[in-house]
Image (tube, rainbow, N blue to C red):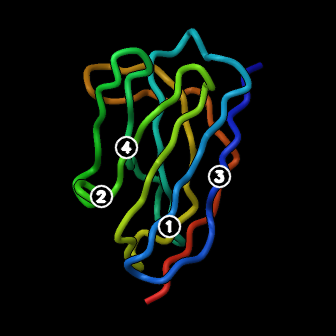
Amino acid sequence: QVQLVESGGGSVQAGGSLRLSCAASARPFSNNGMGWFRQAPGKEREFVASIFWTIGSTYYTDSVKGRFTISRDNAKNTMYLQMNNLKPEDTAIYYCAAGVFVGTKLQSNLWGQGTEVTVSS
């Protein structure tokens, strides 16, 4: 069973940066994509960004475009989320996911345990 382990969360002030990592214990070959989702207190989980594992195409939710960058290192089976110019509304638990793209939407079937990001004003 492939496992996804997130790291890199923490507390920062608004305008700061964090880099999240998601290490897969093995390449989830049944899937062709990975992504980041987040869940803020009292809210539903929402999509943040995704990436095609092979060709590297990326997708972002509008609220993070220009601030967040998703990337992957195929050799390390690791995905990253570079988050710059963080805002208090980015505060959430961030989850790594693996899945299959249906069009441009990632259908996730494997999840990490989450890493907490807190942004103070």
Disc 1 marks which amino acid? Answer: Ala
Disc 2 marks which amino acid? Answer: Val
Residue at 56% x, 9% y: name it.
30
Circles 4 and 2: CB atoms closer than 8 Å: yes
Circles 1 and 4: CB atoms closer than 8 Å: no
The residue that mark 1 highlights is 40
Disc 4 marks which amino acid? Answer: Ala
The residue that mark 4 highlights is 49
Q: CA distance from mark 1 to mark 4?
A: 16 Å
Residue 12 x/y as whole percent: 53, 78
Q: CA distance from mark 3 to mark 1?
A: 12 Å
> Which one is in front in this view, the residue at disc 1 or the one at disc 4?
4
Q: Earlier in the sequence, mark 1 or mark 4?
A: 1
User: Of residues 107 and 6, which is closer to you in this image?
Assistant: 6
Q: Return the mark for residue 64.
A: 2
Q: Few, some or many C-alpha atoms within 10 Å of disc 3 (few <14, some 14-19, many ≥20)?
A: many
Residue at 46% x, 37% y: name it.
35
Q: Earlier in the sequence, mark 3 or mark 2?
A: 2
Q: CA distance from mark 3 to mark 4?
A: 15 Å
The residue that mark 3 highlights is 114
Q: CA distance from mark 4 to mark 2?
A: 8 Å
Residue 20 x/y as whole percent: 56, 52
User: Of residues 80 and 100, which is closer to you in this image?
Assistant: 80
Q: Few, some or many C-alpha atoms within 10 Å of disc 2 (few <14, some 14-19, many ≥20)?
A: some
Q: Earlier in the sequence, mark 1 or mark 2?
A: 1
User: Left or right: where does residue 66 sit relative to residue 10?
Assistant: left
Disc 3 marks which amino acid? Answer: Gly
Residue 104 x/y as whole percent: 26, 27
Q: Earlier in the sequence, mark 4 or mark 2?
A: 4
- Look at the numbered disc 3 and give the secondary structure of its residue: loop
Q: Few, some or many C-alpha atoms within 10 Å of disc 4 (few <14, some 14-19, many ≥20)?
A: many
User: Left or right: where does residue 53 sit relative to residue 73?
Assistant: left
